[in-house]
Image (spheres, rainbow, N blue to C red):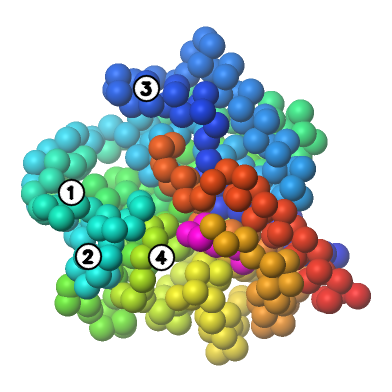
C-alpha cells in the first residue's frame, strides 16, 4: 500500500456516480433479476466506462482510484449475485430504516430529498434475509472486475487501485438471519465466503477496502441505545468475524472504511468515534478510512490526541463531504488534512472523501459535476497541506 512519503496522497471511498449508459444496463439487470456476469455489448460498455472513470480520477488528481464500483448495483446489495443463502421474505425488519435519528426528525426526513421514508411507513417490509447456507459463487464476477480494473490501469498508468468489499457485519445487519442457530454462526459463514473474494482480489495485486457502515450505524438502530462500552462489545464480535474473513491476507493490502451512513439528516444519534476507535484499530488492516468532513464528526481528529495511531498504520480521513452540494475550499481541505497529520504523522495520512457519492447505481448524493469539482479541491487541498507539512 502506498504511503504519503513526500506529499499527501489522495483517494476516495469507492462508489462513484454511474454514467447514463451504465445505469441503463444495471437497471435492466435489476428489473430482470439477472445475476450472471456481464456479456457482449454490456461488458464492453461497462469496461469502457471503468477505463473512462479511471481517466477522470487521474485528471482531477486522485492518486489511488477505484473502478467506481460500476459493475455493482450497490456497495452492499451486489453480494446477492456472489453469495448463496439469501431470499426475499416478509417480516419486521425496520430497524435499519427507522433508527432513532429518523424517529426524532421523521417529519423533516420525509421532506428531505433522499432522506424520507414516507408518512405511511410501516416496519412490516419485504426484505432479503438469510434463509439457507452461505457459500461464495462469485468467482466469475470477481475475475471480471479484476480484468476490468487491470484494463483500466493499463490505459491510465495507475500502479495501485483499491477494490471494495462489504464487511460481514454490514451484510449481517442488513440481512436478517433466519437460518443459522446464532448470529455468530451466521457471521462466520459470511466471513468464510467473503474471504474468497478478499483472496482473489489481493492475489490479483489489488488493495482491498472493507466497507462497514453498519459498524457504527447499528448504534442508531438500537432503541434504547446501549451504553458505549456495551456497544463496543457488540462491535467487537463483528470485528472478530471480519478478521476471520481477512485471515492470511497481508495487512498492507487491506484498508477499512467506516462511516455514519450516507443519508442526509441531522445524525444526532451517531455514536462518537472515541467510543469505537479502540475496536476499529483491532481490525487487521493497515489503513482506516473515517468520516472527517461530516459536521457531526469533523472535530474527531482530537481522538488521536488521546489514542496513538499504531506503528505502521495509516489514517484516511474524509476531508470532502458527499452529503452536501457545497464545494469545500482547498484551504479548508488542507486544514483538515493538517489536523490529522499533526496528530498521526504526515506520512500516515492519505486524504479522501467521507463516503461514496453513489451508494447504489440509482443513487447520487450530488450532481456529477459537483463530485468532480470536490475531487479537484481534494487534490488542491492536499497540495497546500503538503507544502505546509514538507515545505
**Comes first in the chain, label 1 or label 3:** 3
Task: Please tell me whether mark 4 or mark 2 is closer to you in this view.
Answer: 2
Residue at 62%, 30% (x, y): give it: 50
| Inter-mark Cα distance, 4 to 3 | 29 Å
Task: Bin the neighbour count of mark 3 within 10 Å (Cα to Cα): few under 14, some 14-19, many 20 and up.
Answer: some
Q: Considering the numbered disc 4 on the image, is that residue within a helix, a strand or a loop?
A: loop
| Residue hosting label 4 | 260
Q: Identify the magenta region.
A: 319-324
Residue 18 or 1: which is nearer the viewer? 18
* Residue 322 lies in the magenta stretch: yes
| Residue hosting label 1 | 177
Q: Is residue 360 left or right of residue 90?
A: right
Q: Main secondary structure of the magenta part?
A: loop
Image quadrant containing the N terminus: bottom right
**Comes first in the chain, label 3 or label 2:** 3
Residue 13: in sight, yes or no?
yes
Q: Is residue 112 left or right of residue 344?
A: left
Task: Please tell me whether mark 2 or mark 1 is closer to you in this view.
Answer: 2
Using the image, tell me which numbered label, if any, was put on residue 107.
Answer: 2
| Residue hosting label 3 | 29
**Comes first in the chain, label 4 or label 3:** 3
Residue at 22%, 73% (x, y): give it: 104
Q: Is residue 145 above or below residue 354?
A: above
Task: Please tell me whether mark 3 or mark 2 is closer to you in this view.
Answer: 2
Q: Considering the numbered disc 3 on the image, is that residue within a helix, a strand or a loop?
A: helix
Amino acid at each position: 500500500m502506498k504511503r504519503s512519503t513526500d506529499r499527501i496522497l489522495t483517494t476516495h471511498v469507492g462508489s462513484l456516480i454511474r454514467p447514463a449508459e451504465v445505469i441503463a444496463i444495471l437497471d435492466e439487470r435489476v428489473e430482470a433479476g439477472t445475476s450472471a456476469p456481464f456479456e457482449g455489448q454490456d461488458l464492453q460498455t461497462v469496461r469502457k466506462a471503468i477505463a473512462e472513470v479511471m481517466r477522470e480520477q487521474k485528471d482531477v488528481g486522485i492518486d489511488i482510484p477505484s473502478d467506481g464500483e460500476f459493475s455493482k448495483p450497490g456497495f452492499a446489495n451486489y453480494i446477492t449475485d456472489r453469495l448463496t443463502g439469501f431470499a426475499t421474505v416478509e417480516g419486521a425488519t425496520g430497524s435499519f430504516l427507522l433508527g432513532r435519528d429518523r424517529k426524532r426528525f421523521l417529519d423533516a426526513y420525509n421532506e428531505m430529498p433522499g432522506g424520507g421514508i414516507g408518512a405511511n411507513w410501516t416496519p412490516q417490509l419485504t426484505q432479503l434475509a438469510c434463509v439457507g447456507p452461505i457459500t461464495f459463487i462469485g468467482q466469475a464476477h470477481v475475475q471480471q472486475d479484476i480484468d476490468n480494473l487491470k484494463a483500466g490501469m493499463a490505459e491510465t498508468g495507475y500502479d495501485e487501485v483499491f477494490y471494495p468489499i462489504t464487511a460481514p457485519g454490514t451484510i449481517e445487519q442488513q440481512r436478517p438471519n433466519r437460518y443459522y442457530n446464532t448470529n455468530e454462526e451466521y457471521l462466520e459463514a459470511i466471513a468464510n465466503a467473503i474471504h474468497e473474494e478478499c483472496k482473489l482480489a489481493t492475489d490479483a495485486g489489488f488493495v482491498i477496502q472493507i466497507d462497514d457502515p453498519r459498524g457504527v450505524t447499528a448504534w442508531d438502530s438500537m432503541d434504547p441505545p446501549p451504553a458505549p462500552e456495551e456497544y463496543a462489545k457488540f462491535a467487537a464480535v463483528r470485528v472478530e468475524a471480519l478478521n476471520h474473513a481477512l485471515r492470511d491476507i497481508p495487512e498492507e493490502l487491506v484498508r477499512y472504511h467506516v462511516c455514519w451512513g450516507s443519508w442526509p439528516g441531522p445524525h444526532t444519534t451517531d455514536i462518537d468515534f472515541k467510543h469505537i476507535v479502540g475496536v476499529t484499530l483491532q481490525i487487521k488492516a493497515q489503513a482506516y478510512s473515517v468520516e472527517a468532513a461530516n459536521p457531526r464528526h469533523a472535530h474527531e481528529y482530537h481522538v488521536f490526541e488521546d489514542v496513538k495511531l499504531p506503528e505502521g498504520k495509516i489514517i484516511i480521513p474524509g476531508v470532502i463531504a458527499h452529503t452536501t452540494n457545497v464545494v469545500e475550499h482547498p484551504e479548508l481541505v488542507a486544514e483538515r488534512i493538517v489536523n490529522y497529520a499533526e496528530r498521526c504523522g504526515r506520512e500516515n495520512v492519505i486524504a479522501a472523501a467521507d463516503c461514496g457519492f453513489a451508494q447504489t447505481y440509482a443513487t447520487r448524493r450530488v450532481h456529477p459535476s459537483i463530485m468532480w469539482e470536490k475531487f479537484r479541491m481534494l487534490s488542491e487541498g492536499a497540495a497546500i497541506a503538503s507544502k505546509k507539512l514538507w515545505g
